[in-house]
């Protein structure tokens, strides 16, 4: 296990109650950070918060926030700043996914995916980055997806939102480099979180297919023949937030291959 130390750092994690967000919150808590959860699911957020406090004895703040609602995001960030005086790290993790052909995707689902995945990331960046600029210190990690690079059938909306997150990261990395704010993106592949479990329900309900078999058909395309685990993604995120990674901004990781191909954008200034 990599031993990170984030004592004294305040970390906002959107969608931190479940899945990759929870794994990331757990690793930051293990490393001593103060955790600020922003989620719409109060019950799961309460459970996660209790677990983290019990296991790691860290401070955890909970905010019920829909990342796609600008007013809620703005008032949360201003409350965190008033209470803690700093925001050191922002993990834009909250996201939703429905995979269907575009013509079968309802307008409601289409708009919601764009609002949560893309607008939500914009809103948190817009509200938190001025604080980090003033501090001349900050780390942002946005959750894109391998879907941003694949051009998969039946995933146009989700993939486009994640490609948007990728490009947003690249632009902001350039905008904030001179203020010593590092802005990076990870592109996870396939991890069996509640998000994937829900997708498997939707994929199998009509033809009564076996969920494990369907999931395996996806992970079989990975050279290592196994999915990533939430902690794999959490560890990459934590590394990008260390001071050892302070010269890395807009670092892309492709996980689909099961091992890491990385590209660092040169000449960001
Ligand atoms: N699981 C994967 O295989 C995978 C692959 C690539 C990218 N990702 C991305 O990683 C991120 C996390 O995915 P996951 O698999 O852990 O998902 P998940 O569904 O397991 O967890 C998502 C969390 O976000 C919260 N959330 C959803 N909508 C919200 C909103 N409007 N406002 C605030 N919180 C909200 C949920 O309550 C939940 O706690 C997402 O952005 C997803 O697109 C996941």
Image (cartoon, grey):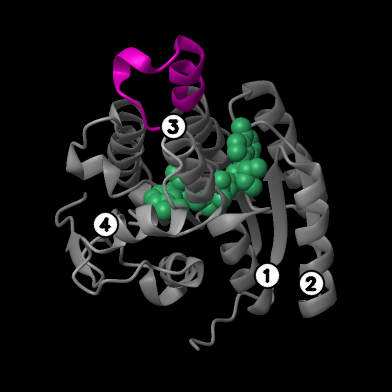
Labels 4 and 1: the sequence-earlier one: 1
Labels 3 and 4: the sequence-earlier one: 3
Instruction: Identify the secondary structure beneath mark 1.
Output: loop
Instruction: Identify the secondary structure beneath mark 3.
Output: loop
Of the two numbered discs 4 and 1 in the rendering, the one whose residue sits closer to the viewer: 4
Of the two numbered discs 2 and 3 in the rendering, the one whose residue sits closer to the viewer: 3
Please, what is the dominant secondary structure of the magenta stretch? Answer: helix
Report which residue position mark 3 lands on.
Answer: 98
Instruction: Identify the secondary structure beneath mark 4.
Output: strand
Are the residues tagged 2 and 3 within 8 Å (C-beta)? no
Which quarter of the picture shows residue 9? bottom right
The region drawn magenta spans 98-114
Q: CA distance from mark 2 to mark 4?
A: 30 Å
Are the residues tagged 2 and 4 within 8 Å (C-beta)? no
Query: Is the shortest distance between ligand 1 and the CB of mark 4 under 8 Å?
Result: no
Question: Does the magenta segment cover residue 122?
Answer: no
User: Horizontal and vertical percent for residue 111?
Assistant: 47, 16
Q: CA distance from mark 2 to mark 1?
A: 7 Å
> Disc number at residue 252?
4
Labels 2 and 1: the sequence-earlier one: 1
User: Horizontal and vertical percent for residue 88?
Assistant: 59, 58
Q: CA distance from mark 3 to mark 4?
A: 24 Å
Labels 1 and 3: the sequence-earlier one: 1
> Disc number at residue 58?
2
Instruction: Identify the secondary structure beneath mark 2.
Output: loop
User: Horizontal and vertical percent for residue 131?
Assistant: 59, 44
User: Horizontal and vertical percent for residue 191?
Assistant: 43, 60
Are the residues tagged 2 and 1 within 8 Å (C-beta)? yes
In the depicted structure, whether residue 227 falls above or below residue 137? below
């Amino acid at each position: 296990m990599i031993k990170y130390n984030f004592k004294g750092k305040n970390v906002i994690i959107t969608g931190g109650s479940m899945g990759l967000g929870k794994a990331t919150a757990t690793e930051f808590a293990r490393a001593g950070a103060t955790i600020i959860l922003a989620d719409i699911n109060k019950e799961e957020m309460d459970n996660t918060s209790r677990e983290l406090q019990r296991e790691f004895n860290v401070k955890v703040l909970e905010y019920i926030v829909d990342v796609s609602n600008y007013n809620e995001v703005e008032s949360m960030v201003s409350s965190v700043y008033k209470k803690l005086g700093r925001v050191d790290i922002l993990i834009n993790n909250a996201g939703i996914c429905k995979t269907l052909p575009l013509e079968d995707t309802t307008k409601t689902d289409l708009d919601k995916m764009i609002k949560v995945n893309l607008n939500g990331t914009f809103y948190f960046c817009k509200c938190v980055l001025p604080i980090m600029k003033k501090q001349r210190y900050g780390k942002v990690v946005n959750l894109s997806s391998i879907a941003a690079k694949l051009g998969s059938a039946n995933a146009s909306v989700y993939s486009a939102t994640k490609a948007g997150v990728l490009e947003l990261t690249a632009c902001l990395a350039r905008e904030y480099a001179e203020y010593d704010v590092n802005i990076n993106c990870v592109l996870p592949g396939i991890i069996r979180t509640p998000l994937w479990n829900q997708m498997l329900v939707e994929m199998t309900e009509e033809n009564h297919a076996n969920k494990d078999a369907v999931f395996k058909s996806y992970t079989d395309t990975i050279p290592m023949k196994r999915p990533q685990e939430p902690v794999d993604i959490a560890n990459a995120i934590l590394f990008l937030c260390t001071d050892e990674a302070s010269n890395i901004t807009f670092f892309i990781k492709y996980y689909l291959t099961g091992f890491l191909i990385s590209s660092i954008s040169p000449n960001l200034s």
